C-alpha cells in the first residue's frame, strides 16, 4: 500500500514520475526481500513453539528477528551509496533514472525499520495475534498518505519535493510505525516478566539455517522479476514500463488479502505441527487454498471487466493516452495468473511453516532463472516481442510454479522435517 500510495500521488507529475516511483519502490523491495523472506521463518518457529506452549522460547525468536532487522539497516546505509552506479547499468530514460536514484536513496534509509515491522509481525502472527501488526501497518499507511500530501506538492509550508518527497514520506511513516510497535513489544516483555530474555546463539544460527533458504526463495524470484522489468520491459519504452509498474502495484494491492489468508493458514499449520497434529495440515491448506483462490478469481474477473477504471489513476500527464492503451491490455492479461498465484502462495507458505524451505528454493531457481528470465529476454528483446509477449511469460511462470509447489506438498516430505529443536531452557 505504501508503494501504491507513492505511485498514485506522484501520477500528476507524469509517466516518468510514475515509472521512477513504481520501479524504485520495486527495486527497493527487491533489495529487502532477502531479509524479509528470512524473517518469515520467525513465524514458523513461533507458531510451532506456541503449539508446544513454549512462550519464552517463542519470544526469543522475536528478538532474533530484530537482530536481522538491525543488520539490514546497516547494509541499507551502504547500499544508498551504490544506487547511482547500479541504476546506470540499466536502459532507463535519463529523467527516469535521475528521479529513481533520489527515490531509492531515501527509501533505503528505512530498510531496517521495515524489517523490524516484519520481524514483530511474524512474532505476533505466530502467537495468533494478527490484529496488532495490522494496526501498525494501517498506522504506517495513514501516515504515509498524510506525509505524501505534505511533501510531494508542498503543503503546510513544506517544500514541493516531488518524487523525493514521496520517498521521504514513506521513510518517516515506516520508522514511526516501527518504533510504536517495538515499544509495544517491550511493554509485553515487562508485562509477562520476559523483558530480559536470554538469547542463545545456537537458536539464532538454527533460525538462519531455515530462514536463509526462505529468504533466498523470495530474493531470487523477485530478482528475476527485477531483471524482467529493468531489462526486458524497460526496453519497450517509458509508457510500457510505467504501465507494467502500475499493473504490479494494482496486483500487489489485490494479492495482499490472499497472502494474508495464506499466512493465516501457515500459522495454523505451524501450530498444528507444534502440537503434534500433522494430519490436520492438509485440511488447513485446503481451506486456505480455496479461500485464496476464490478471492483471486474475483480479482481476475474485476481485471477483465474494469481495466480502464483500474489503470486510470496511473495514466496521467502528457503521455496518458499511450500509458492507458498499454496498461488496459496488461491489466486484462494479468487476470490469467491470479488463481495460479493463489495456489503458489498458499502452498509455499504452508511448506515454509513446516520448515520445508530448501526444495522450493531450487524449484524457483530452476523456473525463474532457467526459463522465465532467458525466455522473456529472447522473445521480447531479441525477437522483438511486445508487451503481450512479456505478460504471457509471467502467466507461464506462475502456472508452473504453482504446479511444482503443489506436487511437493502432495509428496508429504514436509512431515519428516524437525524445525524446532529441544527448548534451550526446559522447565
Image (cartoon, rainbow, N blue to C red):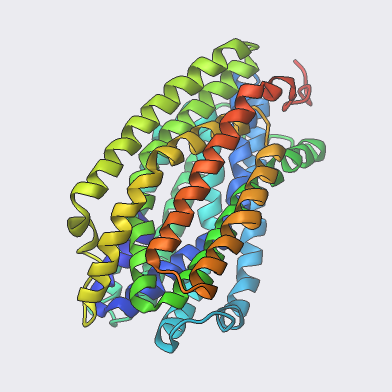
- Give coordinates of residue 156: x percent, y percent: 21, 75
- Give coordinates of residue 359: x percent, y percent: 70, 38
**Quadrant that contains the N terminus:** bottom left
**Quadrant that contains the C terminus:** top right
Q: Which residue is drawn at 30% across and 77% down?
A: 15
Quadrant of the rendered image containing residue 313: bottom left
Foreground residue among 365 and 383: 383
Q: Judge left or right: residue 132 versus residue 348.
A: left
**Residue pushed farthest right?**
202
Instruction: Answer above or below: position of 418 versus 183.
Output: above
Instruction: Answer above or below: position of 158 versus 49.
Output: below
Instruction: Answer above or below: position of 96 versus 401.
Output: below
**Residue pushed farthest front?**
383
- Give coordinates of residue 382: x percent, y percent: 54, 74
Instruction: Answer above or below: position of 312 versus 81.
Output: above
Q: Which residue is drawn at 47% across and 54% down?
A: 394
Quadrant of the rendered image containing residue 386: bottom left
Q: Judge left or right: residue 319 versus residue 122.
A: left
Q: Judge left or right: residue 237 versus residue 105.
A: left
**Residue pushed farthest bottom?**
94
Foreground residue among 283 and 98: 283
Amino acid at each position: 500500500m505504501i508503494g501504491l500510495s507513492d505511485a498514485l500521488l506522484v501520477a500528476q507529475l507524469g509517466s516518468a514520475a510514475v515509472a521512477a516511483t513504481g520501479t524504485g519502490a520495486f527495486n527497493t523491495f527487491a533489495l529487502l526481500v532477502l531479509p524479509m523472506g528470512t524473517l518469515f521463518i520467525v513465524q514458523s518457529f513461533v507458531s510451532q513453539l506456541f503449539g508446544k506452549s513454549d512462550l519464552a522460547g517463542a519470544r526469543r525468536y522475536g528478538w532474533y528477528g530484530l537482530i536481522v532487522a538491525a543488520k539490514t539497516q546497516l547494509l541499507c546505509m551502504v547500499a544508498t551509496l551504490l544506487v547511482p552506479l547500479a541504476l546506470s547499468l540499466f536502459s532507463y530514460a535519463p529523467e527516469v533514472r535521475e528521479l529513481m536514484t533520489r527515490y531509492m536513496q531515501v527509501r533505503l534509509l528505512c530498510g531496517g525499520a521495515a524489517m523490524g515491522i516484519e520481524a514483530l509481525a511474524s512474532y505476533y502472527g505466530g502467537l495468533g495475534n494478527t490484529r496488532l501488526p495490522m494496526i501498525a501497518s494501517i498506522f504506517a499507511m495513514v501516515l504515509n498518505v498524510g506525509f505524501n500530501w505534505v511533501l510531494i506538492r508542498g503543503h503546510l509550508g513544506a517544500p514541493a519535493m516531488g518524487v523525493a518527497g514521496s520517498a521521504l514520506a514513506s521513510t518517516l511513516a515506516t520508522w514511526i510505525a516501527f518504533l510504536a510497535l517495538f515499544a509495544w513489544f517491550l511493554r509485553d516483555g515487562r508485562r509477562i516478566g520476559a523483558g530480559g530474555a536470554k538469547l542463545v546463539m545456537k537458536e539464532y544460527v538454527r533460525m538462519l539455517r531455515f530462514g536463509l533458504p526462505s529468504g533466498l526463495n523470495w530474493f531470487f524470484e523477485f530478482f528475476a522479476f527485477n531483471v524482467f522489468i529493468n531489462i526486458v520491459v524497460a526496453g519497450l519504452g517509458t509508457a510500457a514500463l510505467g504501465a507494467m509498474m502500475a499493473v504490479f502495484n494494482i496486483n500487489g494491492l489485490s494479492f495482499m488479502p490472499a497472502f494474508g489468508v495464506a499466512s493465516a493458514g501457515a500459522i495454523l499449520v505451524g501450530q498444528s505441527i507444534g502440537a503434534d497434529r500433522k494430519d490436520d495440515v492438509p485440511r488447513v491448506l485446503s481451506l486456505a487454498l480455496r479461500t485464496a483462490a476464490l478471492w483471486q478469481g474475483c480479482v481476475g474477473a474485476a481485471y477483465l471487466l474494469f481495466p480502464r477504471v483500474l489503470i486510470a489513476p496511473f495514466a496521467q500527464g502528457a503521455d496518458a493516452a499511450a500509458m492507458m492503451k498499454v496498461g488496459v491490455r496488461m491489466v486484462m492479461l494479468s487476470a490469467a495468473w491470479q488463481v495460479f498465484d493463489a495456489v503458489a502462495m498458499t502452498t509455499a507458505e504452508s511448506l515454509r511453516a513446516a520448515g520445508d524451505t530448501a526444495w522450493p528454493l531450487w524449484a524457483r531457481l530452476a523456473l525463474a532463472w532457467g526459463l522465465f528470465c532467458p525466455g522473456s529476454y529472447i522473445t521480447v528483446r531479441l525477437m522483438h516481442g511486445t508487451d503481450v509477449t512479456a505478460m504471457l511469460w509471467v502467466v507461464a511462470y506462475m502456472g508452473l510454479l504453482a504446479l511444482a509447489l503443489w506436487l511437493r506438498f502432495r509428496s508429504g516430505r514436509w512431515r519428516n522435517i524437525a524445525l524446532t529443536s529441544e527448548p534451550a531452557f526446559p522447565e
